[in-house]
Amino acid sequence: MKNKFGIYIHVPFCHSKCNYCNFYSLANTSLIEPYSEAIAKEIIDRKNTEKGEVASIYFGGGTPSMMSSDWFKKIFEVIYSNYSVVENAEITMEANPDNISPLFLHEIKSLINRLSIGTQSFNDGNLKYLSRKHTAQKGIDSIKMAQDAGYDNITADLIYGVPSSSPQVFQEDVHQFLELKIPHLSAYALTLEENTKLSLDILKGRLSKPLESEAEKNYLFLMKVLKEAGFHHYEISNFALPNYEAKHNSSYWSGQHYLGFGPSAHSYSGDERRWNLSSVAQYIEKMKSNEVYFEKEILSFENKLNEYIMTGLRTRAGISLKKIALDCKAELFILFQQNLSQINPAFYQLSNEIMILTDSGKLFADGIAASLFFED
Ligand code: SF4
C-alpha cells in the first residue's frame, strides 16, 4: 500500500480581526498576489519531500473563503500537476458565514468536497461578545446555502463558555446545530489568549471573564446531547455522525505525515517538525530570494512518545500501553506506570492495555497527558 500524507494550505487573510483570536492574519489584501506566487513556488519546491499519495487537502486560515474561485483553481492546478492525489481525497475549505455566496459555492463545488463553516454561535449576543461580523441568522443561512449547493459534508464550529451567555443560550446553540442536520461539529471552550483584544478588554473591565465552571457544564451538556443524537465523540473537540469524521484532522492525531504550505504553516515528517515564518511579507521575500523561510525541530524519542500520549488521549482510539512499553526502556515504563497510578481512576478506562479518557477525564485531558509525559 502506498504511503499517504496530507497537505495543509494556510490562507493568512481576514477581513477583520476577531477579539479572541491570536492567529496571525492580515486584513490588508494587497499582498494576496505575491503570497499566491510564493505559495505556488513552495508547493512545487517541496514536491519530492514526501513519498506516496495525498489523501487530504485542507485550506485553513485566516479566511480561505475570501479567496476567489479562480485562486482555488490555480492552486489546484499546481497541486495536481506536482503531486499524486488519491481519487476520493477529502478536500476541506474553512469558510466564514459572511463571505460565501451561492455562485462561489457552485464554482468551487468540483474542487472542494468538505466545508468547515465558522459559525461559532447561533446567538447574536455571543457573536457580539466575540466581535464576529456575522449574525446568527447569517450563520444559519450560510449552512443552508451550502446544503442547497449540494454539500453534505459540512462541519460547523461552536464556542462554549462565553460569559455573556447562559446555560440556556448554549443549549439553544446545540439544538440549533442539530436542527441544521449537518454531520460534524467542532466545539471549543473560549480561552483567553495573550495579546488579544479580548484579554485587554477583560483586563480593563470592559468585558466579563469566561468562567471555567460554565464551560465545563456546557461541555458536559454537549457530550450528552450529541451522543443521544448519534454523534461519535471521536476527538475531544470533535463530534461526527458515522463516516463523517474529518480525515485530514484525524491524520494529525494519528501521527500521519503532512506538508504545510504558506506563512506559519506546520509540517510533520515523523522525525521532524517544521514551521514557516508567520509574517506574510517575510515569507514572500524569503521565497523570492530562495532563502530559508522556516524553522525546524528534530523530534527526540521522548518528544514522539509525548506527542503520541497528548494526541492519543484526545481521541477515542486512546493510547496503547503495549506500544509505550515497546518504545521505551523498562525503567521508563515503570515510571510511566507510577504516574498512571496517580491519576483518578474515574478519569480513564483501561481495557486490553488501551487507555481511553472517560467524559469526566476529557475535562482534564491536557493535565492528564502532561502528568504522563516522559522527560526530555
Ligand atoms: S476569522 Fe478566524 S482567523 Fe480570522 S480573526 Fe476571526 S477567528 Fe481569527
Image: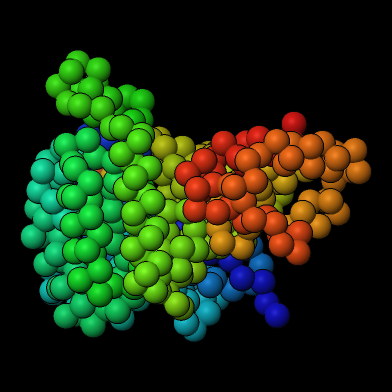
Residue depicted at x 23% and y 46%:
167
Up the image or down, 189 lies above or below 177; here it is above
Q: State the residue in front, 109 or 328.
A: 328
**From the image, which quarter does the C terminus lie in?**
top right
The residue lying toward the viewer, choosing from 163 and 113, is 163
Q: Quadrant of ligand 1?
A: top left
Residue that appears at 70% across and 80% down: 1
Residue 159 percent across, percent down from the top left = 29, 48
- Percent from the top left, x then y, of residue 326? 86, 54
Residue 11 visible: no
- The answer to which image quadrant residue 105 occupies is bottom left
Residue 145 position (above or below residue 255): below
Write the residue at 21% across / 71% down.
180
Measuring from the top left, give residue 283's x and y in whole percent: 42, 40
On the picture, is 338 further left or further right than 35? right
Q: Residue at 16% of width from left, 73% of height from top?
A: 144
| Residue 355 visible somewhere in the drawing | yes
Check the image and name the residue furthest to the top: 204
What percent of the width, then of the height, locates residue 212? Answer: 36, 34
Q: Is residue 273 above or below residue 149?
A: above
